[in-house]
Amino acid sequence: MAADWTRVDDYLVEALQPDDPVLDQALAASAAAGLPAIAVAPNQGKMLQLLALSIGARRILEIGTLGGYSTIWLGRALSPEGRLVSLEYDPHHAEVARGNIARAGLGGQVEVRVGRGIDLLPGLADEAPFDFVFVDADKSSNPDYFAWALKLTRPGSLIVVDNVVRGGAVTDPKGDANVQGIRRMMQMIAAEPGVSATAVQTVGSKGWDGFCLIRVNG
Ligand code: SAH
Ligand code: DHB
Ligand code: MG
């Protein structure tokens, strides 16, 4: 099954997305630096970019940078005045990401801040509201990240949360801390009258997972 999913992902990316040496090099540099291969797939990165472009996002917030692969996809959705802030706990990941972001020509618009998301988010109030938030860090903190994303956005903003299915584990009420974080976030979203949301399963080169798409009402 997984081999089929990857074959089809390879076909879809080859069919619709031009070769992209900058993004390929970002993945190669991340692998060479020992980072795990858990960046979004190329077609998922493109989807994030299209969503950000569709709403004309000028301020983007990312939680969980890794080597900056999704950051580059999103950074390319910005007009020249646009800004992206990405939060990353691991200083080594952040250093690799900064190199990849600079090689992508986005060094002037994208800032990687090092620290725990939960410690850095309160300091972003002056830079809010963000038009688009991509949540992709430690899944156990998703309830906190969703609460902060709500505070830091405006009516019409989009919030995308990655990895909400985790090979089907999300349906287990006794799942691990990551599953608990995802399930509690889902309850918060459902109880929040100020947003409209859906979640979609995905299969592909990254296995069986899914994302949650949330729109702030207005
Ligand atoms: N968005 C990236 C993938 C991120 S992987 C992409 O698709 O290309 C998750 C990242 O979150 C890792 O780099 C990990 O170090 C970071 N992370 C883990 N816990 C964190 C925390 N508490 N605060 C901020 N980042 C965290
Ligand atoms: C993991 C994290 C991710 O952001 C991802 O896309 C896939 C896996 C993980 O921590 O295992
Ligand atoms: Mg992810």
Image (cartoon, rainbow, N blue to C red):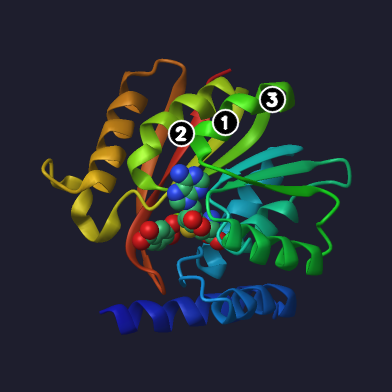
- Dot 3 surroundings within 10 Å: few (below 14), some, or many (20 or more)? some
Mark 1 or mark 3, earlier in chain: 1
Image quarter hosting the N terminus = bottom left
Viewer-nearest residue: 149 or 118:
118
Q: Position of residue 48 (x, y in %)?
A: 59, 52
Q: Nearer the viewer, mark 1 or mark 2?
A: 1
Tag 3 secondary structure: loop
**Mark 2 residue crowding within 10 angstroms, few (<14) / some (14–19) / many (20+):** many
The residue positioned 72% from the left and 44% from the top of the image is 84
Q: Nearer the viewer, residue 163 or 108?
A: 108
Is residue 137 visible in this depiction of the protein?
no
Question: Is 2 left, or right, of 60 in this rendering?
Answer: left
Question: Mark 3–mark 2 contact, CB under 8 Å?
Answer: no
Question: In this picture, is 68 found above or below 138?
Answer: below
Q: CA distance from mark 3 to mark 2?
A: 15 Å
Mark 1 touches mark 2? (CB < 8 Å): yes
**Residue 118: horizontal and vertical position, in percent?**
49, 33
Residue 75, labelled with which disc?
Answer: none
Q: Tell me the distance, in whole angstroms, between the alpha carbons under discs 1 and 3.
A: 10 Å
Q: Amino acid at mark 3?
A: Ala
**Residue at 25% over, 37% down:** 183
In the rendering, which numbered label is found on residue 145?
2
Badge number at residue 121: 1
Residue drawn at x 33%, y 82% is: 4
Q: Position of residue 154 (x, y in %)?
A: 63, 21
Q: Earlier in the sequence, mark 3 or mark 2?
A: 3
The local secondary structure at tag 2 comes to helix
Pinpoint residue 114: horizontal percent, then vertical percent.
61, 47
Closer to the N terminus: mark 1 or mark 2?
Answer: 1
